[in-house]
Amino acid sequence: MLNKKTDLKDRLQAAIATKNEDPDLSIRYLAERLRVSNTTLKNRLKNRTSPRKIAHESQQLLSHLEEKRIVQRIENYDNRSIPLHHGRVIQMVYEILKGKGRVAEIGNGWVDRFVQRHPGI
C-alpha cells in the first residue's frame, strides 16, 4: 500500500507537470482528474507554498541549517566510533543557542523528535 502523503505528492507533481506541458488546461479540471485540492494546486503553480521544513522554522528551537550542523556532528562522532547519548546532543544544541544569544529549555522528547526528523542518523 502506498503512503498517502507520497501518493498526494506524486499526484500534485503530475498535475503541475501536466499544466506546464499544456497551459490551456484548467486548474479545476486537473485537480478533479488527479484528485487533488484545487486551491493547493493553484498555490503550488503560483509558488505560494514553501516546504514544511522551512514554513515552520520560526516555531522550532533550531533552524534547518542548525539541525543540519548537529546531524553532521553526530555523523562525525559515528564515523570515529564514538557513542553519543542524549545528553551530549542536548549539549550541542545549547552550544548553538548560546552562540545565538538565546536561552531556551529543551523538552524531554526533543532528541527523540530530532531523530525522527533525521532518520539517517
Image (cartoon, rainbow, N blue to C red):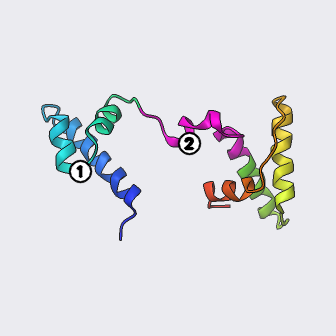
**Identity of the amino acid at label 1?**
Arg
Q: Position of residue 40 (x, y in %)?
A: 33, 38
Which residue is painted at 18% across and 46% down in the image?
32
Q: Nearer the viewer, residue 99 or 42?
A: 42
Q: Quadrant of the N terminus?
A: bottom left
Circle 2 residue: 53
Specify the quadrant of the image occupied by residue 118.
bottom right
Q: Which stretch is magenta?
A: 49-69
Among numbered discs 1 and 2, the one appearing first in the sequence: 1
Circle 1 residue: 35
Q: Please check the rendered image and state whether residue 65 is part of the magenta-colored stretch, yes or no.
A: yes
Q: Position of residue 74 (x, y in %)?
A: 77, 56
Q: Nearer the viewer, residue 105 or 97?
A: 105
Specify the quadrant of the image occupied by residue 121.
bottom right
Q: Position of residue 47 (x, y in %)?
A: 38, 30
Q: Is residue 97 left or right of residue 68?
A: right
